[in-house]
Amino acid sequence: MSEKFIGLTITWLLSWSIFAIDQLSTTIHHMNSYGEYVLGDRSQESQPALAAKLNNQVKTPSTSETVPEQYDENICSDKKFWSEVKAEIAPDRRNIILTFPSTPKETGIKSVEIVAKPTTLSYRSSKNAFHMHSIFQERLNISKKEHEIQVSLFNGLDTKYTYLVTDWKLDLIASSKKSDDCYESTFLKINKLNYENIENLPVFYERNTLSPFFEKNYDVRDIGEDEYLNQFFQKLQLKELHKTLPKPHEAALALLNKDVKYDFENFKKEDKYVDEYISQKHRLHGEVILGLFGNVKQTDLNALNNVLHVLNIVVPQLQISYSDNPNDVNLPIHFASCTKRFSELVNDCKGKYAGLFYHSHNRFDEAKFGWIWVDSQYGRSTREHILIHELGHALGLGHNLCRYSVMSYADYADSMPYFTEIDLMQLRLLYDQKLRDRMYSYQVIEELELDKEVYSEYESNKKPMCSPQQSGWKGLVELQQGFKTVEELLKEGN
Ligand SMILES: [Zn+2]
C-alpha cells in the first residue's frame, strides 16, 4: 500500500456514500490521480509542463485561441469546424461571446458545454476548497450559431487563510451522437484583469433562522437588549440541561470502539465491524465556528440550528456557533452539486460519495477543525442526513451498522436526518468532561464508573450495541425533528 493511498484512506474512510440509495457500478480509475488533477485535460501532461502553463500570463485574452486537445470521429475531429469557432470576452467584460461557423446541431453535435475551471491543482486543502464554488458550467443551445453567455464567477473567499482564484480557463466540451466528450479544448483564459463578472464568495446567511445566541456576530439592535438577554439565559439553561442527561452507557462505549470501513477498491461500504478504539477518536474543543457556503438553502441552516441546540445540551463545553463573517469560520461546510465536471475536478464524487469530511492536517490551518462537503443535488431530507452525518464525523463519531443512526453504513438503515438516541449517547460519552485525550477503554470504564461485565457483553455483541434501553433521549430527538420546541424541552427539564 503506497503512502498516498494510506493518506487518502485516513481522510476518506469517513465518507458517506449513496450506495444505499442508488446502487451503482463503478470502476477503479481514480485513486492514483487524487490531488493531482490536471484540469479537464485527459491527456498525460507532465507536471512541469502544467506548471509552466499555469504560470503563463494571458497576453491577449480577448482573442480566440482554440487548441484542440483530443480528436475523435466525425465532427469532434473536424479541425476546420473547430478552428472557425470564435470566442471573445464581450465589451462589457461580463459575458462571453461564442460564434460557431454553423449550428452545432446540423454538424452532428449532440451537446456542447462551456466550463470555466479555476487553475487550481488540488481542492483538498481548506485554503483551496472554496474554489469548488468557482467552477462554472453551462450547456449551450445547439440550435444556435451565436451565443452570449453570462459566465458569473466566484473568486473564492477573501480571508487571511484562503487563496483566491487567480485565473480560469474556459473550456468547450462537445459530445457527438456516437461519443461523449469527444472534443475538449481551452478557448479563452480569464482573470480579474480582463473580466469583471467575478465576485467574492459570501457565507450563507438568512436572518431570523438561527437562534440569536448561536450567531457569532449578532447585532443586539435587531431584537432589543431585553430579548437578547432572554435568549442568552435560554442558552445557559440549555447547557444546564446537560446535568439532567442519562449517565454514560456501556453500549455507547462499545460502539465508540468500533467502526465500519469503506472499501476503496470496489467503492462500497463494508458490512462488518472493525476495532477502532476510543483512544484514537478525535474530539472538537474550544470555539467551533460553522459557516455554510455555496448552494445552500434556508432549510439547511434551519437543520443546523436544531443541531446546535442539541449540541449545547450534550456537549456544553463546546462554544459552537455560526458566523456570517468568513474570517471567523473554522469548520466550513460546502454545499455543491456533484455534477460530472465537478467530480472530475474536485473529489471524484460521481456515483461514489454524497458527502465528505476532511480532517485538517495542518496545525496552522485556519479551518482547524477540517471541512465538510455536502452534495447539494438532493432534496431536503437527504441533504440534512448528509450534513448531520458529516458533522458527526467532525465531532469524532465513526460508522456503525445500526438501523437507527445517522452514522449507519447498513443497507437496511433508515435515512435519519438527525442525531438519534444511539448517536447522542456516543457524543455524550465521548465528550464527558471526565475523559482526557487518548484514554483507553479500561480507563474510560473506570473514570465513568461503567460496568465492565455489561460493557463486555455489548462489545462482544451478546447484547445488541445499537439498541440499548435508556430513557431520557427522546426529547432531544424530537427537538431535531421539529416535534418539540426549545421552550417545551426546558420546561420538561426543570
Ligand atoms: Zn461517513
Image: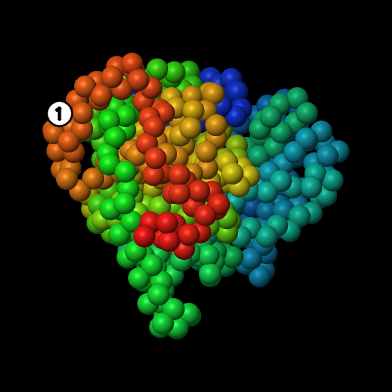
Task: Please name the residue shown 70% across and 57% down the image.
Answer: 149
Q: Is residue 488 left or right of residue 22?
A: left
Measured as percent of width and height from the top left, residue 30 is found at 47, 26
Q: Is residue 227 above or below residue 286?
A: below
**Which residue carries the number 1 mark?**
442
Using the image, determine if residue 308 lies above or below residue 336: below
Label 1: few (<14), some (14–19) or many (≥20) C-alpha neighbours in 10 Å: few
- Colour scheme of the rendered structure: rainbow
Q: Is residue 63 above or below residue 396?
A: below
Relative to 17, residue 304 above or below: below
Quadrant assignment, res 297:
bottom right
Placement of the N terminus among the 4 image quadrants: top left
Q: Can residue 357 be spotted in the picture?
A: no
Q: In the rendering, at what x and y percent does residue 244 appear?
A: 31, 51
Q: Nearer the viewer, residue 61 or 104?
A: 104
Q: Is residue 185 left or right of residue 234?
A: right
